[in-house]
Amino acid sequence: MLLDEVLRQAQDLGFFGPGDMRRHRQHSEAFVALVLRALGPEHPERFLDLGSGGGLPGLVLAEALPDTPGTLLDSQHRRTGFLERAVADLGWGDRIGVVNARAEDAARDPAHRARYSLVVARSFGAPAVTAECAVGFLEPGGRLIVSEPPTTEPTRAGASTRPGRWDPAGLTQLGFDPPAPAVTRAPGATIATLTLPAGPLDRWPRRSGIPSKRPLW
């Protein structure tokens, strides 16, 4: 089965918005291209898609990194059931896992805590929620790359910082490199890249539901 067919099935099931499926896939492809640019020549040893939903961008990233193991994480049984079938149909069952759990709970599981060199997120939540829910998955030196709204003015190098969305004090509290993530634009996508130099601190994330109820910023 081709990935396009899988994504059409996901749209039919209501896992992402209406409109031309090509637009959804093109955005994910542009996002993945920026992710690979941010990573440089070294591919991640293992990646996690935070709140994978219908598989965007996780399935597109898995296709772009055919030798890299990864995990698609979502808290809704209906979505993870679909993703399990999709991964099997695509023939990726030996390297792409699907986990049904809250991010805060999975990040405390020894099977996933500090196990990923890359975490990606698209429409998971507000920046403070995304950063806290992702931090427990990252190994020392791991990177969180988040799809951003296309509103940042780029510098000549194509990157800038957005302290309004990504509070430096909050990021430092979580253990990320300060003061704010690099935000990079390209046609079709914008990303924020955060690096966790020393792995997750014991206190993060807080228990399930607290990051969204009491965000750090």
Image (cartoon, rainbow, N blue to C red):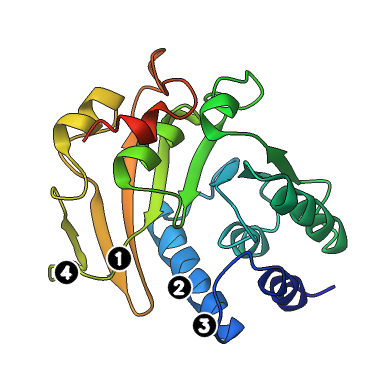
Q: Earlier in the sequence, mark 3 or mark 2?
A: 3
Amino acid beneath label 3: Arg
Q: Earlier in the sequence, mark 1 or mark 2?
A: 2
Label 2, label 4: how far apart the Cα atoms are: 16 Å
**Mark 1 or 2: the one toward you:** 1
Q: Where residue 62 sits: x, y (%)?
A: 65, 58
Q: Image height check: is 144 above or below 153?
A: above
Could you tell me which secondary element the residue under label 3 belongs to? helix
Q: Image height check: is 19 above or below 205?
A: below
Residue denoted by label 1: 149
Residue denoted by label 4: 154
Could you tell me which secondary element the residue under label 1 belongs to? loop
Q: Earlier in the sequence, mark 1 or mark 3?
A: 3
Front-most of residues 202 and 216: 216
Amino acid beneath label 2: Ala
Residue denoted by label 3: 23
Q: Image height check: is 203 above or below 197?
A: above
Residue denoted by label 2: 30
Q: Image height check: is 36 above or below 13?
A: above
Occupied quadrant, residue 210: top left
Amino acid beneath label 1: Pro
Q: Where residue 19 sits: x, y (%)?
A: 55, 85
Report if the CB atoms under discs 2 and 4 are less than 8 Å apart: no
**Mark 3 or 2: the one toward you:** 3
Q: Is residue 183 left or right of residue 20?
A: left
Label 1, label 3: how far apart the Cα atoms are: 16 Å
Label 3, label 4: how far apart the Cα atoms are: 23 Å
